């Protein structure tokens, strides 16, 4: 499994390697000598993926990272490295996260990935998801993990960024999710599977809602940065464990909610405190949810 994205660090060069957790807490990770906090974004995703692979007894994720504070330099380095090396890296799962949505580079990357044999399973969230939709290659992807405002973006055939969603689609997006799902598939703005993250999580496969998850309801998680990124990290890990995508999405949504409930969060809670609950959540529930029963 390869997770690729940027981190908000000014001087971090392009970095590739296996991720390591420094202690039993998920607050700090190390990649090729670089120490990175698990706050939100790509590193929250990586930390949740690492917690999941550790529980399943799988190899830890490989990660491709670069610093980018909005200039696009790091994003271009990540895209170009993947374009040049994806065939030799040959990941079974390629999960793309925070990168600036550079349409031409996403189109080139998608063309290269389509030629890979076997083709990696493709996951995208955040800027990489925006790039895939804007580049017209959303349907090449296996799973997207949008929130309600982002599904409105995927449903807008004209928008090239969530900032430009048509007003009539953006208004009341939370109450119109089933309609927006159908619009997204009709305009080829959706991946094969969707996990729409929100007060209610929707699991969608080929345009059909196969499950809705609303419990436990932990509204405090809405204001904690990174709690959507953790879901995407778990999805990538469970997909790497060869679960069906809709099952991987379902387990990840349930585990995220259960971890939030165990953490008893407040607005001051850090996402690492929620990730720390995942091993116990898996021990208590994973066998029942999935049939994956580990000692």
Image: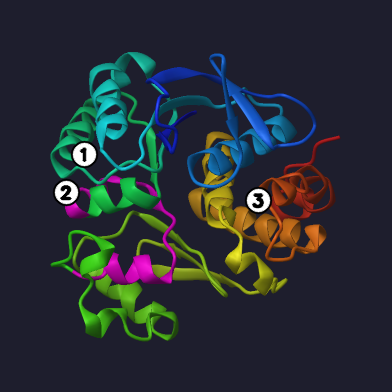
**In front here: 11 or 141?**
11
User: On the image, numbered disc 2 is attached to which residue?
Assistant: 135
**Residue 258 on image: x %, y %:** 74, 60
Q: Which residue shows up at 69% across the image and 37% down it?
A: 27
**Residue 113 on image: x %, y %:** 26, 30
Q: Secondary structure at mark 3?
A: helix
Which residue, as the protein is rendered here, is positioned at the far front?
A: 10
User: On the image, numbered disc 1 is attached to which residue?
Assistant: 106
Q: Which residue shows up at 62% across the image and 22% down it?
A: 59
Q: Nearer the viewer, mark 3 or mark 2?
A: 3
Q: Alpha-carbon distance for marks 3 and 2?
A: 31 Å
**Residue 229 on image: x %, y %:** 53, 50
Q: Would residue 117 be counted in the magenta stretch?
A: no
> Image check: 17 left or right of 126?
right
Image quadrant occupied by the C terminus? top right
Q: Give the total number of marks visible in the rendering.
A: 3
Above/below status of 240 relative to 277: above
Above/below status of 266 relative to 103: below
Q: Nearer the viewer, mark 3 or mark 1?
A: 3
The dot on residue 271 is 3
Range of the magenta residues?
134-156
**In front here: 185 or 148?**
148
Above/below status of 222 relative to 171: above
Assess whether mark 2 and mark 3 are in contact (beta carbons under 8 angstroms).
no
State the image quarter where residue 190 is shown. Answer: bottom left
Q: Alpha-carbon distance for marks 2 and 1?
A: 7 Å
Q: Secondary structure at mark 2?
A: loop
Assess whether mark 1 and mark 2 are in contact (beta carbons under 8 angstroms).
yes
**In front here: 173 or 54?**
173
The dot on residue 207 is none
């Amino acid at each position: 499994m390869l997770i690729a994205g940027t981190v908000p660090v000014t001087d971090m060069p392009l970095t590739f390697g296996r991720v390591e957790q420094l202690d039993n807490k998920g607050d700090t990770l190390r990649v090729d000598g670089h120490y990175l906090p698990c706050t939100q974004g790509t590193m929250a995703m990586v930390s949740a993926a690492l917690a999941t692979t550790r529980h399943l007894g799988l190899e830890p994720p490989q990660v491709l990272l670069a610093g980018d504070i909005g200039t696009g330099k790091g994003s271009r380095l990540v895209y170009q490295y993947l374009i040049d090396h994806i065939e030799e890296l040959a990941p079974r799962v390629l999960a793309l996260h925070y990168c600036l949505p550079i349409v031409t580079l996403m189109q080139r990357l998608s063309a290269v990935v389509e030629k890979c044999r076997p083709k990696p399973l493709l996951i995208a969230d955040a800027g990489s998801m925006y790039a895939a939709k804007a580049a017209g290659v959303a349907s090449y992807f296996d799973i997207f993990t949008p929130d309600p405002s982002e599904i409105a973006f995927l449903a807008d055939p004209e928008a090239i960024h969530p900032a430009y969603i048509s007003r009539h689609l953006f208004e009341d997006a939370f109450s119109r999710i089933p309609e927006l799902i159908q619009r997204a598939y009709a305009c080829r703005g959706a991946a094969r599977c969707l996990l729409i993250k929100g007060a209610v999580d929707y699991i969608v496969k080929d345009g059909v809602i196969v499950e809705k998850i609303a419990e436990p309801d932990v509204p405090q998680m809405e204001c904690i940065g990174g709690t959507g990124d953790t879901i995407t990290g778990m999805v990538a890990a469970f997909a790497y464990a060869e679960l069906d995508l809709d099952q991987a999405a379902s387990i990840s949504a349930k585990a995220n909610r259960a971890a939030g409930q165990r953490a008893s969060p407040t607005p001051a809670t850090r996402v690492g405190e929620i990730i720390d609950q995942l091993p116990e959540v898996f021990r208590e529930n994973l066998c029942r949810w999935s049939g994956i029963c580990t000692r």
